[in-house]
Amino acid sequence: MIFYLQFLMGGIVVPLIATVGINNKVQFLEKWGTSEFTNSTGAYELDLSLVGDSGRAWRTMHVKSDVFCSASIVLPDKGARQLNVGGWSLESTYGVRLYTPDGSPGVNGTNDWEENHNELSLQRGRWYPTAMLMPNGSILVVGGETGSNGPPEPTLELLPFGGSIITLDYLRRTDPNNLYPFLMVLPSGRFFIGYYNEARILDPVTFDTVALLPNMPGSVNNFLAGRTYPLEGSAVLLPQHAPYTDPIEILICGGSTIGPGIALDNCISIAPEVANPTWTLERMPSKRVMPCMVTLPDGTYMILNGAHQGVAGFGLASDPNLSALLYDPSKPVGQRMSILGSTTIARLYHSEATLLPDGRVLVSGSDPQTPGLPEELRLEVYIPPYLSQGLQQPQFTVTETDWVYSGQYNIVVTLFQGTTSNMRVSLVAASSSTHGNVMSGGRIIFPEFTCAGNVCTITAPPNAFVSPAGWHQLFILDGPTPSHSAWVRIGGDPGKLGNWPNFPDFTRPGV
């Protein structure tokens, strides 16, 4: 299989969190206050159209407290604001930060991160929490610890409405091996939560346990291996195809063991809502802890970064895993993984991988604080197989970009290899990624569409359970080859987050 890796450019920051904004620029958040770079402001934006001019490609932005090990998601409001919550210590653990992407490729924006903990904060301080958009439009924030290596915060809370703090005894019991728990909305409307080596399904209103799933298998030599930080693996939802009647599956790859830190050499998957669900185990070609997984527009997944040994944290892993894998769920179990190629740059703790609007994958960061393994400023782009065959990328235009559930929307397509009879359409949910945790579940949907000539009509997903409200990258695929993406919003802003928060230090884009 042909596979290419390219050096993109030198960087100015070791990113902690990476997000692609609807301005098609990449927003990076970095440790601030605890950064080794004394001039760091904690936030930067990369204009990919200017990578040949590093002086102009980077825009310096600012946060007011330390985002080290916080959570980020993209909101469904009109501005596609990025929300960041939690942090490292003291007031930063209560932090609620918002940024509205602006500008355009080649044109700098002027917006910056907005934060004032005296006006807006979490109810509980959280270090290593997870955030998720619920189908009703509220924001669920779960887990973490009270601060750097502090006591557990085994609770959940809601934004923006506040309300009661709910204690989750299973997070208290499994601390400290359950940080950055995996959270995903299921097509039933219920929630999947994965933590340490356990998983369960939650009621979306009471958050009570509806079903306790089988324990996640670990490895042949240690069944107690774990999948969440610091035994860090990565998790995604596998593709959903119209008419959305097949049970959804969840894929979790990599992880490690308590004590010796032996990285896991497998991925596991489950359809959590079928009768008597069980985990399916598939061996990877090599061991991997701290992997990143990227959902690609063709419904495959790139697995990369991490180490063969250790756990997540400073100075706790060695022996970088330099290879990249492709996982293809359309193939039979046991035949889904292929080796793509290798890099020469170690990507360990605090490394990220992000799908770009042109279908490439941006790879950034590494902050291992391990002798012989430097803090990594260089950026790379991985060119997946669908872009390495010399085929021209298809093109399309879309006029209506604010979609309602089950609505029908036209695009005009230009194909260069095939016809609309073998074309596909995909919707990749906007996400933020940190510590291998893709805080949208890496959701990808293949909606129904019909074509008359070069005009195709796409039917939007049916509801907020199949597709929680939010922004998506819309791609078309001409055979194997994806287009550049266009941003569409599906389902509006049911929680009216665009009118929140009503304080003078925050901009409200509207719903």
Image (tube, rainbow, N blue to C red):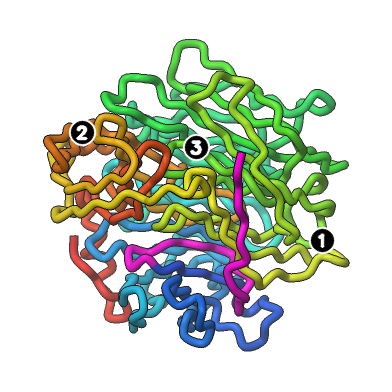
Helix, strand or loop for disc 3: loop
Up the image or down, 93 lies above or below 415; here it is: below
The stretch drawn in magenta includes residue 107? no
Query: Which numbered tag is attached to residue 315?
Result: 1
Q: Which of the numbered marks, if any, corresponds to residue 300? A: 3
Q: Nearer the viewer, mark 2 or mark 1?
A: 2
Which segment is the magenta one?
1-24
Q: Is residue 107 above or below residue 128?
A: below
Disc 2 marks which residue?
449
Label 3 vs 2, first from the N-terminus? 3
Residue 321 in view here: yes
In the displayed structure, 213 sits above or below 291; it is above
**Magenta stretch holds residue 16:** yes
**Mark 2 or mark 1, earlier in chain:** 1
At x 71%, y 50%, the residue is: 342
Q: What residue sits 64% from the left and 59% below the top?
A: 351
Q: Residues within 10 Å of mark 2 (few under 14, many from 20)?
A: some
Q: Amino acid at mark 3?
A: Thr
For mark 1, give the secondary structure: loop
465 or 269: nearer the viewer: 269
Towards the viewer: 296 or 98: 296
In the displayed structure image, the side of residue 373 where residue 388 appears, left or right? left
Find residue 14 and report its horizontal and vertical position in percent: 63, 71
The amino acid on which the numbered mark 2 sits, given as a three-letter code, is Phe
